[in-house]
Image (cartoon, helix red, strand yellow):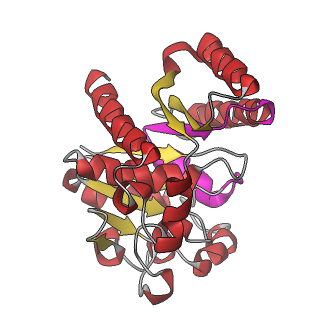
């Protein structure tokens, strides 16, 4: 059975998409079967997986509106080693179109059941807002991976996200839990980041992943080449950290 994880944070610009595509590539590299689902109308995770969103005939939009199955809409990213259920601007319309539909927040969950046995991991890249798309992701997932920078504003955003997860857990998805917090864009030379990192560990304990993703130029450059950093420059510090994180995820799932 596939383990389904949302990569979510209600604060923008914290590296959700970078985390999603690099974790997907890292998991593929350590021998896992992965489906990456792009739930953001910007389609950055799709483009960052070496898939041109403008050329997609079917996307997650068609899956949510039940005019296509996951099997029909997914595409293979040969360079990255995982499958992609892509997104483009069309997906923004799904917000409006789903409002009056039955089972509107469970559409993705039901669609993913059809391919459950084909993957070890399904990673859902969520938009920064709490929208119908994010809600579909949260209702589908076994847990949430929260990428966050070690800054005080990030702590405030985390409080909002924890409250949202509690509400979804109580009302829509009893399986949902925070799997862990991933410290990203980390620079140990900055005292404030060290302090926030220590606060996170003190408050959340083993919910904070051991792996830390450093601030890394090669990770930042990789999307302009349409690739995850793990594929673009495997030797870079950030890329190696994501492969380490992939191994930590596999190990953590074994213990669950």
Tell me, yes or no, if residue 212 can be seen here: yes
**Residue 93 vs residue 247: left or right?**
right
Tell me, yes or no, if residue 125 can be seen here: no
Q: Position of residue 88 (x, y in %)?
A: 55, 77
**Residue 187 vs residue 35: left or right?**
right
Disc tally is 0
Q: Position of residue 59 (x, y in %)?
A: 45, 77
Magenta-colored span: 128-153
Residue 84 image-quadrant placement: bottom left
Given residues 88 and 95, the one toward you in this image is 88
Q: Position of residue 232 (x, y in %)?
A: 39, 62
Q: Quadrant of the N terminus?
A: top left
Q: Quadrant of the C terminus?
A: top left
Given residues 150 and 119, the one toward you in this image is 150
Above or below 203: residue 34: below
Residue 204 image-quadrant placement: top right
**Residue at image point 20% right, 52% down:** 117
Q: Position of residue 153 (x, y in %)?
A: 80, 35
Given residues 245 and 188, the one toward you in this image is 188
**Residue at image point 68% right, 31% down:** 150
Above or below 215: residue 40: below
Above or below 226: residue 193: above
**Residue at image point 19% right, 47% down:** 31
Verify whether residue 152 appears in magenta: yes
Verify whether residue 157 appears in magenta: no
Above or below 158: residue 220: below
**Residue at image point 65% right, 74% down:** 92
Q: Residue furthest top?
A: 202
């Amino acid at each position: 059975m596939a383990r389904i994880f949302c990569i979510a944070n209600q604060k923008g610009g914290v590296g959700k998409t970078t985390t999603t595509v690099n974790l997907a590539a890292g998991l593929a590299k350590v021998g896992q079967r992965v489906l990456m689902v792009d739930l953001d109308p910007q389609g950055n995770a799709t483009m960052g997986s070496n898939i041109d969103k403008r050329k997609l005939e079917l996307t997650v939009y068609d899956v949510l509106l039940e005019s296509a199955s996951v099997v029909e809409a997914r595409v293979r990213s040969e360079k990255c080693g995982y499958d992609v259920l892509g997104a483009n601007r069309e997906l923004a319309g799904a917000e409006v179109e789903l409002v009056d539909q039955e089972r509107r927040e469970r559409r993705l969950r039901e669609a993913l059941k059809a391919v459950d046995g084909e993957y070890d991991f399904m990673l859902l890249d969520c938009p920064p807002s709490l929208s119908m798309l994010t809600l579909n992701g949260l209702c589908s997932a076994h847990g949430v991976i929260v990428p966050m920078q070690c800054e005080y504003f990030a702590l405030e955003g985390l409080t909002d996200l924890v409250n949202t997860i509690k509400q979804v857990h109580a009302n829509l998805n009893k399986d949902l839990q925070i799997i862990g917090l991933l410290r990203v864009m980390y620079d140990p030379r900055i005292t404030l980041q060290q302090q926030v990192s220590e606060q996170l560990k003190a408050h959340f304990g083993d919910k904070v992943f051991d792996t830390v993703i450093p601030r890394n130029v090669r990770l930042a450059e990789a999307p302009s080449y349409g690739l995850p950093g793990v594929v673009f420059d495997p030797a870079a510090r950030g890329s190696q950290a994501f492969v380490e994180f992939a191994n930590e995820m596999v190990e953590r799932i074994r213990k669950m």
